[in-house]
Image (cartoon, coloured by chain):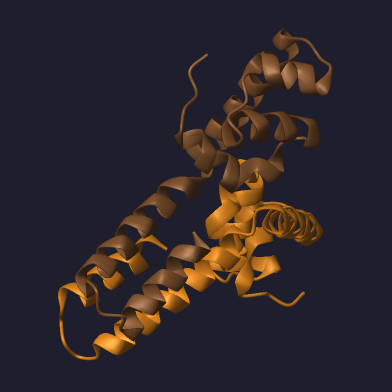
Chain colours: A brown, B orange
Amino acid sequence: MAKDLSLVLLLDCYGELLTERQRDIAEMYFNEDLSLTEIAETRGITRQAVRDSIRHSEQTLLETEEKLGMAERIIGMRDCLEKIMQHCGDADTEIAQLAREGLLLL
Amino acid sequence: MAKDLSLVLLLDCYGELLTERQRDIAEMYFNEDLSLTEIAETRGITRQAVRDSIRHSEQTLLETEEKLGMAERIIGMRDCLEKIMQHCGDADTEIAQLAREGLLLL
């Protein structure tokens, strides 16, 4: 089961739409980078139950992104603000500060 | 029933989570600014059915924002990009162009 890095962003955007149990397992898997076996041992459940939970969460996150497209908007905004930062170069102008504040919101 | 303008943004963010019928009615009410009576006549349903549908949609949209907070992030980003535009003034610099592009994503 290959971990998809973009699911980290989807989990950040839509994690609250998962059940508490699904989110708990998905966070260990995607954010803390634990293996299926490690999560199974930590939570006292089977490796298969962990795998099923993650598959189900992935499906919910991907379907929600297909409907709402918020992660795509955030990636576009991040790209835009990073380019503004690059244009500012080393100068710590007010524009650079604003762009940095914007990036913290993403 | 007072129309809440911020619901226009919530409908933009999360409208796809409503049923097609709910979204249809909510768009007429919040985006096209039709009255309950006008919507009822257009769709051949009672004024009460329109009101119930809008109440239900409002609840879904508000609950989703409470969970995900995407509209708040978008308002913060918009504020940030508008301030960057103000700093650019009349000069059509690359930074101003990037900020304009960013605003189009929101």
Residue depicted at 20% across the width and 70% down the height:
A87
B94 relative to B42, above or below: below
B27 relative to B21, above or below: below
Residue depicted at 84% across the width and 17% down the height:
A44
Q: Is residue B34 left or right of residue B94?
A: right
Report if residue B24 is visible in the image: no
Residue depicted at 52% across the width and 72% down the height:
B76
Residue depicted at 75% across the width and 16% down the height:
A40
Which residue, as the protein is rendered here, is positioned at the far bottom?
B89
Report if residue A9 is visible in the image: yes
A75 relative to A82, above or below: above
Q: Quadrant of residue B88?
A: bottom left
A80 or A24, which lies in front? A24
Question: At which x and y percent is residue B4?
Answer: 67, 74
Q: Is residue B51 left or right of residue A102?
A: right
Question: At which x and y percent is residue B68?
Answer: 65, 53
Question: At which x and y percent is residue B100?
Answer: 28, 71
A49 relative to A82, above or below: above
Q: Quadrant of residue A27?
A: top right
Q: How many marks?
A: 0
Question: At which x and y percent is residue A78?
Answer: 37, 57
B68 or A85, which lies in front? A85
